[in-house]
Image (cartoon, grey):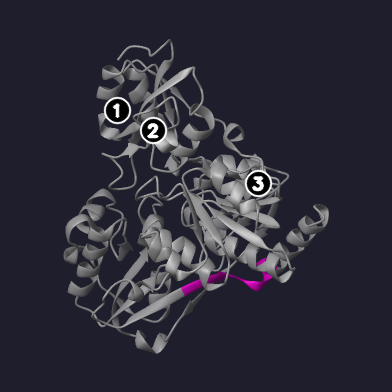
Amino acid sequence: MQRSNNRKNIIIMGAAGRDFHNFNVCFRKNKKYNVVAFTAAQIPNITGRTYPKELAGKLYPEGIPIYPEETLPQLIKKYHVEEVFFSYSDVSYQYLMNKASLVLSHGADFSLISPERTMLKSKKPVISVCAVRTGCGKSQTSRKVVEILSKLGKKAVVVRHPMPYGDLKKQMCQRFASYDDLNKHKCTIEEREEYEPYIERGFIVYAGVDYEKILKKAEREADVIVWDGGNNDTPFFRPDLHIVVADPHRAGHEVSYYPGEINAMLANVVIINKINTAKESDIKKVETNIKRINPHAKIIKAESIIAVQRPDTIRGKKVVVVEDGPTVTHGDMKFGAGLIAAEMCGCKIVDPRMYATGSIKETYKKYPHLERVLPAMGYGKKQIKELEETINMIKCDAVVVGTPINLAKLLKINKPAVRVKYELDEKATRELEKIIKHFVKRFKI
């Protein structure tokens, strides 16, 4: 395929989220470019689909195919690609430059798009909550921001970073206000982990694929838009207050991961979370790095308070620990709140790897740093079933669930399951309240 009507042939490298947004904002109506393909990484079961014509627009009457990222060199050659745009997040600088080298060595240019170019401007004030890595505690911070706004009598509507793992046409613009909505939209475990905690508290969440449409609908029922970021990505909406969460358990990652460092550089407020379970030297390292790259940001130090439901059920028992999938996979964490809670209760931790089946077994091969925890992978019915089978085969007394949702509602688990919850401590909450009160006053909401 040569140039189409003098349009430059390009590929967008993605993971079913930022890539679609970048296309919608920068390329959908842009006659200078011809997007010949998306490539997909990080998330299973994305490839083999087509970005549909209903979303792709008039320039793409047949839609745009989505290929595995492994085929990128062949695609560059086949389609005479001149430029490749990297459009996913939570990757190390080493990983990013390896991808750049791959593209450049095959004759195409390698490009990144400025967050500023892709931020949509809202008619309503926007508070964004993002992070420097997956699993920093961003979601608990986002929920706290929404609760504070609610106590101030303001209606906050949450817009979540995309997770469109199903039918893209049906997921163009989604609104979640009840548990029935989760079932109606056939949400995966990963989606439920993000949406359900808001629904439990009576708040509305939007998500999907086309964030221009989503923003317009959210604005109709909100005093304030709260952008709940994901995967350490930058906001899709231009924030009036940008809050970023950092994690001292991965000290140094705030300046060595893309685009997490960009978030830290743009932040008005940086929350150094989990200080109650981190080393003082690591907390200091994060603080020093933040002050160096963003001396104007306000820094808040926060504890992530872990609470175990029915702790006597697991105290001293033999348990398997199930942690939030993204946090311990591409987030590079060896543990989460679940393992910390299990150790607090004196549990004997079972190694789940020998019991893993199907795609769960493949997950351990892909992420060899995982040894003591079971990632709650659930990107489709088949994988959810494999997770259930893995848990039920493990010989132990109980299951410690460190995910944001109650897995026992989704899986038929053949042993007692105990949930672990985690929230920001009161001191950090009070500091956030002051900032948000000032924000509400400044914008006369």
Q: Is 245 displayed left or right of 344 in the figure? A: right
Identified at 33% across, 85% down, the residue is: 316
Tell me the SS state at disc 1: helix
Instruction: Say which of 301 and 436 sits in front.
Output: 436
- The quarter of the rendered structure image containing the C terminus is bottom right
The residue to which callout 3 is attached is: 267
Tell me the SS state at disc 3: loop
Residue 389's x, y, as percent? 20, 69
Question: Which dot, 3 or 1, sits closer to the camera?
Answer: 1
The residue to which callout 1 is attached is: 72
Q: Which residues are magenta?
A: 421-429
Tell me the SS state at disc 2: strand
Instruction: Say which of 68 and 24 sits in front.
Output: 24
Amino acid carrying mark 2 in the image: Met
Can residue 234 be spotted in the picture?
Answer: no
Of the image marks 3 and 1, the number of the one nearer the N terminus: 1
Question: Cβ–Cβ below 8 Å for labels 2 and 1?
Answer: yes
Spatial CA span between label 3 and label 1: 34 Å
Q: Is residue 424 magenta?
A: yes
Q: Is 411 displayed left or right of 395 in the figure? A: right
The residue to which callout 2 is attached is: 13
Among the 4 quarters of the image, the one containing residue 156: bottom right
